[in-house]
Amino acid sequence: MPLCSEPPRRGALLAIGEALIDMIPAETGCDFARVSAFSPRVGGAPANVCAAFARLGGRAALVTQLGDDPFGRKIRDELDACGVNTALIRFTKEANTALAFVSLGADGQRTFSFYRNPSADLLYRPEYLDPGWFRDAFALHFCSVDLVPGPMAQAHDRAVELAGQAGALISFDPNLRPALWPDAEALRRAVRRYLPLAHVVKLSDEELAFLTGETDIAAALPALLQGRTRLVVYTCGGGGAYAFTRRARAYAPSPRVRAVDTTGAGDGFIGSFLYGLCERGAGPDALDALGEQDLQALLDLSNRFCAYSVQRPGAIDSYPTRQALEG
């Protein structure tokens, strides 16, 4: 289904959480000890989601804090260049911008080693949020990386509260990074607390069993479609993706491509999916009305977006514009 030639009809995407530098290895198919060099690329799930949304023509703004250092300024400048509003980003001298060193397997799958103890984003405080930011918001998006106990986790709580009051759609992609948590159970508890607070929840096949105890998405759905949650997006990498509401469900296969780097692929998926929802004006009250064809078209857009992205290195650098996606 071709993308609409007009920009989204309603509001902007706000994403809160980490923005960091992904240190991409010069070689693939080897562990960290064998990598000869790393190159810095802008990343962090909320930043990536904003970039994907903006690349397709939407309005997006990132809510975070960066170190007043060269890496922080690099993130701001590159987000500016791809159309993300960076006016809501704070800078601090209290801590540095986070780094994530990446190791890539031969199939493009990655592992991470994080340098953030703490990083500047974790020091963002709830009082920095302005309720006015949410009045024109189509959606608020977040993940679990910055939900570790501290000021930034409290800022997430406040952002979810403000988004709910403004009638914005709330989107949550757990984007699990166990190495950042003291133990697996602390991560599981935190994510489970936020799942029912989101209207849209995105999970990967690798995350399902950890969070729900089920290996079958159909068996997990009754527990996931609770509270505010009206739409569950379930991604299976090369196996395609599914979408479920309380009334409809759909599946779309992934295009067959050779993956070079999967960094940021899941973020690109949910960013483009949210763009599709925004394009349709599908806020919280409209999710239950989405039919199978609507869901399939949304999944198809995101699958094509990811297929384009994983054939290129990096996250934001690899995201297509609307023109490139249709070319």
Image (cartoon, rainbow, N blue to C red):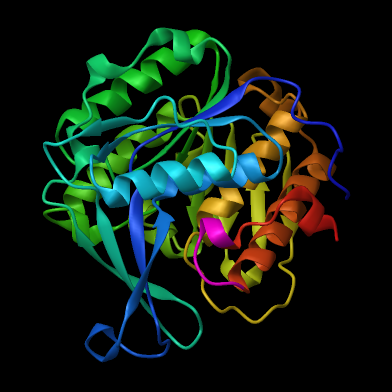
Residue 316 colored in magenta in the image: yes
Q: Which residues are magenta?
A: 312-317
* Direction from residue 151 to residue 232 in the image, left or right: right
* Direction from residue 241 to residue 147 in the image, left or right: left
**Is residue 173 in view from this perspective?**
no
Q: Quadrant of residue 236?
A: bottom right
* Image height of 271 relative to 218, above or below: above
Q: Position of residue 131 (x, y in %)?
A: 40, 9
Looking at the picture, tell me which residue is in the foreground, 271 or 185: 271
Residue 204 colored in magenta in the image: no
Q: Quadrant of residue 67?
A: top left
- Residue occupying the point 45% across, 32% down: 86
Specify the principal SS of the magenta part.
loop
Quarter of the rendering occupied by the C terminus:
bottom right
Q: Position of residue 271 (x, y in %)?
A: 58, 44
**Is residue 3 in view from this perspective?**
yes
- Residue occupying the point 77% across, 29% down: 280
- Residue occupying the point 42% across, 84% down: 105
* Image height of 177 relative to 118, above or below: below
Q: Position of residue 65 (x, y in %)?
A: 28, 34
- Residue occupying the point 65% across, 45% down: 55
* Image height of 48 relative to 197, above or below: below
* Direction from residue 197 to residue 114 in the image, left or right: left
* Image height of 155 relative to 46, above or below: above
